[in-house]
Image (cartoon, grey):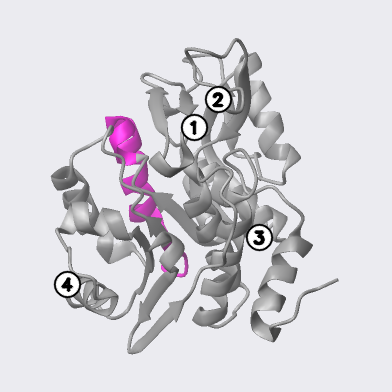
Amino acid sequence: MKTDIISYGEPLIRLTPERLKTFLKSDSWQVEVGGAEANVLAGCSILGLKTQLLGALPNNFLGRRVFQELRRFGVGVDCLELSGEGRMGLYFLELAHLREGAEVLYDRKDSTFSRFELKEKDFSLLSQSSLLHLTGITPPLSSICDINVRNLLRFKPATLEVSFDVNYRSKLWSPEECRKFVEEVMGSIDIIFIKEEDLQIIFGLENEDYQEKLAFLQSNYGKDKIYVLTAGEKGCFVLSKDISIYQPSFATEAVDRIGAGDAFVAGFLYGYLCKKSLEEAALWGNAMASLKMSVAGDMPIFDRHFVEALVTSSISGKVNR
């Protein structure tokens, strides 16, 4: 069966203290399933795309919990292997003050995913997919993960498009290491997503002119790609060939900002794969990000009609009642 979007990345279990409490104060922790690539696929799935996630989970109650949760929300898990070795990747999130952001502690070293080598059957699935989505989180997890990502790009058929979210994590690698990797794989990428702050950290671009920032990327890496710069409450900026687009964000009440960038990517890729204009794709991305921030958890889990209503209200200026 043809898959719209396939991805390779580590699903994680997220542990968060009770609302309005810290880890020092809370006696019970909320359990969520997340991980950048899983979040993107979950968002794409609720919008109606067929998805598949590559990788592995430990064959224990934690791994099976994640496996079932992904399947519950429509993420294709036929290629997600349950292995008897290794451990489940975890992360701890403390939302002590929304204005000050969040504090994250990772506990994912030597996880089952980081030790799992992709097999020939995994690479063969690329020919059955329309788009491969990768992020900058996966390569620094282990040498095996780095090789897996490079092999996915190496063995991909010419017809398969690739999107890449830089998604820089300072706890995984340095700006120099991240930039070196991005430059090495950029020739295989068709759509690149990068946050405003990541562009500053990795490439040292500090000016406020977004067109200049995107023009810098285009001049260095080619006009044949789609460059998407996300700037939080300021909205997003897209450059493709000579087409430059600005799409303002939606006003929203921020309950949980984690995963908003992944929700944006899901909305944008949905629009792109459904042959919508880049302006519409950016609009769908902003709508998904806005709705995600209004719900708790990593994944953008809400009914598709909420996204459609937000997109429609933006286009028509009307409010659905």
Say left or right for 114 vs 313: left
Label 3 SS: loop
Q: Is residue 132 visible?
A: yes
Instruction: Say which element carries label 4.
Output: helix
Q: Identify the residue position indicated by label 3 in the image.
A: 2
Q: Quadrant of residue 21?
A: top right
Image coordinates of residue 265 in percent, x first then y, are 50, 59
Query: Gap in Å between the C-alphas at discs 3 and 4?
Result: 34 Å
In the image, is residue 166 above or below residue 218? above
Mark 1 highlights which residue?
95
Provide the secondary structure element on which disc 2 rests.
strand
Left or right of residue 130, residue 172 in this image: left
Q: Are marks 3 and 2 in contact (CB under 8 Å)?
A: no
Q: Is label 4 or label 1 in front?
A: 1
The answer to the question of whether label 1 and label 2 lie on touching residues, with beta carbons closer than 8 A, is yes
Residue under label 4: 220
Q: Nearer the viewer, mark 3 or mark 2?
A: 2
Q: Does 161 appear in magenta?
A: yes
What residue would you read off at disc 2? 16
Q: Which of marks 3 and 2 is nearer the N terminus?
A: 3
The overriding secondary structure of the stretch rendered in magenta is helix
**Residue 45 spot, x, y in % from top left:** 68, 54
Between marks 2 and 4 in the image, the one whose residue lies nearer the viewer: 2
